[in-house]
Structures are given as structure tokens and as C-alpha cells.
Amino acid sequence: MPRTTVAPRATDRLAFPILWFGQFAAVAGLTVVVPLLPFYLAGLGLPDYEVAWWTAVSLAAPAIAQLVTAPLWGMVGDRYGHKAMVVRAHAGLAVAVGLMALADTPGEFLACRLVQGACGGVVGATATYASTLAAPNRRGRALGSLFGATSAGSLLGPLAGSLLVGRFGFGALFGSVAALLLVAALLALSTLPRRTSRRTRPFEAYGQLRLRKVIGQIVSDPRSRALVLAGMLGQASVFSLVVVFAPQVEGITTSMSSAIVWVGALQAITWAAALVGGPWWGRRNDRRAAWTSFAIAAAACALAVALQGLPTSPEFLVPLRIVQGFSFAALAQSVMHVVCHVAPEQACGAALGTTNGLLDVGQVWGPLLGALAVGLLPPSLTFAAIGVLLLTAAGLAALGTSRRQTHSSPGGFSRPSLV
């Protein structure tokens, strides 16, 4: 039976700006510290030879916790409504970041990062909510717009970190970020309409769909299987780059203070390009196969990253970071786009939560791989190795182009049925 078209309510029209602001606040708050994490940990008293490994572990910690909790939070959202998960994610992240302001040792900071992963997950929660709000033929635009919020937050976060940390300290900055996230949680609680699946049949009518069945449907489809694996490699590549990039910039600049400014500026340039790329790739995914977008973007990103080990002056990194940022904007949203179409709609939260957790596997071992590469390889080969990982991801995504079929829904997909 065809679905009746209903005019969007005023609360629905307000939902996307609220989601955009919340995701922007979360990403901006977290990216204040991520590119400067090696410097922050060194300031906690770590010796130089331990900084790379503590950086890797601190980057991986939220992903380890989220790998376990994200699918479970997704199932709770499918059962009780996705609005609650948006509010929970912002409030949980506010608590975690507030605790970071009190951390005095690397171990305490690591514990806060674990809380962040277990109680946060803003990106996955907002993506799930947006996917239930947007029409299927505009889902790519919705996800691309949210990635624009990620890019905008990542653009301003490093700038704020580079310019303000030296003046106010990390503790005060973490406290301010926690307050901003609390505001985002209150806005979501008071403004967002309650959203569940677009289907009107209750969740119980499907026999309490188990998580393993959702995972099975994602894995059984060759397109989503290939793209999730490619996304994991893409995440691993980007997070391994975080470990090696700051030392590389420090090596081609004149001082630590100059390196801090350049790291922040180059991160900002990267995310400015991603801010433009996110909506562009989203619109493309509504018209063409998302796995093709991923393959093209990952290949371009691989070339840009591989060349970053060669410049002897930070100015020459600028065009490479622009290409990297614009291309990277396609990766995660393309994976989510495919999973949204492949997974059963009434289990969208569980499917996207599972996918988000799987993507975070790359965040776990990527930094460890980067730390290992720093100790074994010269800078030029380290960046080349990361480029090879991204090129492999492009190859995996390209496998989807050989599995194109005739489908009935937008983007070349037909949604599976559970009954």
C-alpha cells in the first residue's frame, strides 16, 4: 500500500537545525583536543617515548566502548524512540567532557575517554534520527548536511584549541565544552518531535528483532558488507594519520609553538574543504550509487595522504589537506547511506548503531598502527603506508559496482522485509 504523503510539521522543520547544532557542538568540543592530543598528554608528565602510545590508546578508547554500546543504544532507540537517544548522547558526552576538566593523569583522562564512548555517540544518534525524518530520496542530502555539521565543528575546534588552550588551559576549555553540550541536550529535549520508524506497525509485531539478525542482513548484502569493511579501513587510515601528523608538522617547522599553530590551521583547512564536500557528496548519493562515491573519494584521499610525507615546509601541505578533506567527506556518510537502504526500516537504529560501532573498529587499531609506523618507518613511508590503506578501501568499495541490480527504491536499493 503506498504511503500517504504528510506535510511536515513546524517541529519537523526545526528538527534539522537542532540536530545540526548539536552535532556541531559535539564535534567542535571534541576536536579541540584531538589534533593537540600529543602535546596535551606530554603536559600531563609523560616522557617523550610514551606520548605516541598514550595518544593511540586515548584515541582508541572511545571506539572500544562505543563498539559495545552503540548497537545496544540503537536497539533502545528503535524500541522507545530516537529522540531519547539524541538527548542521551549529548548529555552523556557533556558528563564525559566535564570529567576531563578534572583529569590530572593520563590514566584519569583515559577513563574519561571510555565514558565518552559508552555514553556519547552523538553522530550515530543524530544520523539515525535524521534517517527516520528524511524522505528516502533525500536521505543522502540529510546525511550530507549532518556531515557538514561535523566539518564545521572540526573546522572551528582546532582553531579554538590552537588559539585558546595556551591562554586558558585545557581544564577551562573542557568545562566550557561540557556546558555547550548540555545546552544542546536541553534544546533537543524541548524541541525535537518524538520519532520512531516510519512504519506504523509496532516494534513488537516483528518478534523483537534480535541484533544478530540485523547484523546478518548487513553482512549478507555484498554492497553493504564491502562498504562497511572499506569504511573501517578509511577510519583506521584517518586516525592513524592523527598520530603521525603532528610530529611531521613539528619536524618541518621551527618551534613547538609554531607547530601547534600550523597543526590547528591545517586541520581547519582540511575540515573547511570537508564542509564543502559533505553536502556535495550527499546530493550525489541521492542520484548515484553511494559505493561509487566512496571508491572515487577514497582513491583521491589516498593520493593526498601519501604525498604528505614529502613536503619540507608546512605551506606545501595546504593543497594536499584540501583534497583530503573534500574526499574524506564522502566516506562515512556513504556507508551510512547504503546501510539505511539495506537494513529493515523498523530496525534502522540498531543497524546504524552497529555500523557506527564497526566503523569505530578502525578508530581502535588505526592509532595503534600509526604509533607502530612512527617507530618503524621514516615519515615519507609512513604516509605512503596510510595511503595504501585508503587505496585498499577504495578497491573494496569498487566491488559494489559489479553487483548493480535493478531496484525499486531511490539510490538503487530495495529494502528487505522482516515478515
Image (cartoon, grey):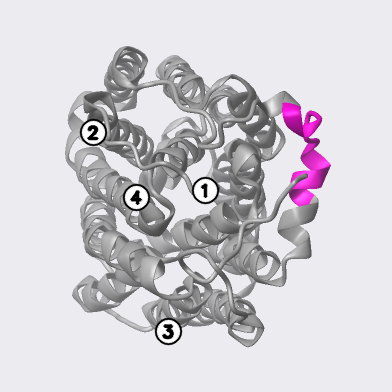
Horizontal placement of 294 versus 342: left or right? left
Asked if residue 103 shows in the view, the reply is no
> Which mark sits nearer the N-terminus, 3 or 4?
4
Q: Amino acid at mark 1?
A: Asp
Q: CA distance from mark 1 to mark 3?
A: 31 Å
Crowdedness near tag 3: few (<14), some (14–19) or many (≥20) residues, C-alpha within 10 Å: many
The numbered mark, 3 or 2, whose residue comes first in the sequence reads 2
Tell me the tag on residue 303.
3
Quadrant where the image shows the C terminus: top right
The residue at which mark 2 appears reads as 13
| SS for callout 3 | helix
- Secondary structure state at the residue bearing disc 4: helix
Give the main secondary structure of the magenta stretch. helix
Looking at the picture, does residue 172 appear above or below residue 248? above
Residue type, numbered disc 2: Arg
In the picture, measured across the screen, residue 225 lies left or right of residue 12, that is: right
Residue located beneath label 4 in the image? 142
Please say if the residues under marks 1 and 2 sit with CB atoms less than 8 Å apart: no
